[in-house]
Image (cartoon, rainbow, N blue to C red):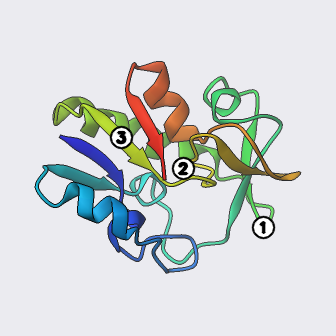
C-alpha cells in the first residue's frame, strides 16, 4: 500500500480548492494499491482555506510544539495540522503503508521544501515529520 497526497491524484483539496495532479505519479500508481490523504482536511480544515506557513522552525519543531502553523488571517492552525498528521499516521499504520508520495512545499506534506514565514525554505511539513519519525519512507513530488 502506498500513501499519497490526495491533491496529487487530482482531488481538489489544496488550500485554494485546486489540485496538483501529477501524470507521472498516476502512471506509476496505475497498477498499485494506494491510499489518498489530505492531512489538512483530516485535521478539520475546510477547502478552500487560508494558506498557512510554519513559523519558528519546520514540521519537526511543530511536532515538538516549538513552532506554530499560522494562516494568512493570522489564525493559529497548529492543532489542525497536528491532528491531521496524527490521523494520517493512524491510517498509514492501519493500511500497512510501505512508502509515501507527498506534495512538496506544503506545510503538511513537504518533504524537502516547505513554506515558512520566510518563504520557501528547506525543511519538511508537519505530517512528513511525524511519518519520518515513525519510520516511513517518503518521496517528495
Please tell me the numbered disc located at residue 56: none
Whichever of labels 2 and 1 marks the residue nearer the N terminus, that label is 1
Residue at 39% from the left image edge and 54% from the top image edge: 42
- Which residue sits at x=41%, y=66%? 7
Dot 3 crowding, Cα within 10 Å, few <14, some 14–19, many 20+: many
x and y percent of residue 49 in the render? 59, 73
| In this view, 130 is above or below 11 | above
CA gap between label 2 and label 1 equals 15 Å
Image: 21 above or below 111: below
How crowded pointer 1 is (Cα within 10 Å; few <14, some 14-19, many 20+) is rated as few
Which mark's residue is nearer the viewer, 2 or 1? 1
Q: Residue at x 43, y 30 (%)?
A: 131
Local SS, label 3: strand
The mark closer to the camera, 3 or 1, is 3
Q: Residue 20 vs residue 96: left or right? A: right
- Residue 46 shown left or right of residue 74 in the figure: left
Q: Residue at x 27, y 35 (%)?
A: 92
Judging by the rendered image, the residue that carries numbered circle 1 is 72
- Choose top left, top right, bottom left or bottom right for residue 71: bottom right
On screen, 8 above or below 115? below
Report helix, strand or loop for mark 2: helix
Q: x and y percent of residue 23 in the render?
A: 35, 70
Q: Which mark is residue 100?
A: 3
Left or right relative to 69: residue 34? left
Residue on which disc 2 sits? 80
Q: Nearer the viewer, residue 65 or 99?
A: 99
Q: Is residue 28 left or right of residue 71?
A: left
Q: Earlier in the sequence, mark 3 or mark 1?
A: 1
Q: Secondary structure at mark 1?
A: loop
Amino acid at each position: 500500500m502506498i500513501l499519497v497526497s490526495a491533491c496529487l491524484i487530482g482531488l481538489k483539496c489544496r488550500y485554494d480548492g485546486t489540485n496538483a495532479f501529477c501524470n507521472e505519479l498516476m502512471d506509476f500508481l496505475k497498477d498499485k494499491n494506494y491510499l489518498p490523504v489530505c492531512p489538512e482536511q483530516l485535521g478539520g480544515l475546510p477547502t478552500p482555506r487560508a494558506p498557512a506557513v510554519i513559523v519558528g522552525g519546520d514540521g519537526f519543531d511543530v511536532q515538538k510544539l516549538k513552532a506554530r502553523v499560522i494562516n494568512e488571517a493570522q489564525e493559529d492552525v497548529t492543532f489542525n495540522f497536528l491532528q491531521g498528521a496524527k490521523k494520517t499516521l493512524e491510517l498509514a499504520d492501519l493500511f500497512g503503508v510501505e512508502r509515501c508520495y507527498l506534495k512538496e512545499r506544503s506545510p503538511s506534506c513537504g518533504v524537502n521544501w516547505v513554506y515558512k514565514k520566510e518563504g520557501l525554505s528547506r525543511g519538511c511539513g508537519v505530517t512528513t515529520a511525524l511519518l519520518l519519525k515513525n519510520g516511513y519512507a517518503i518521496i517528495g513530488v
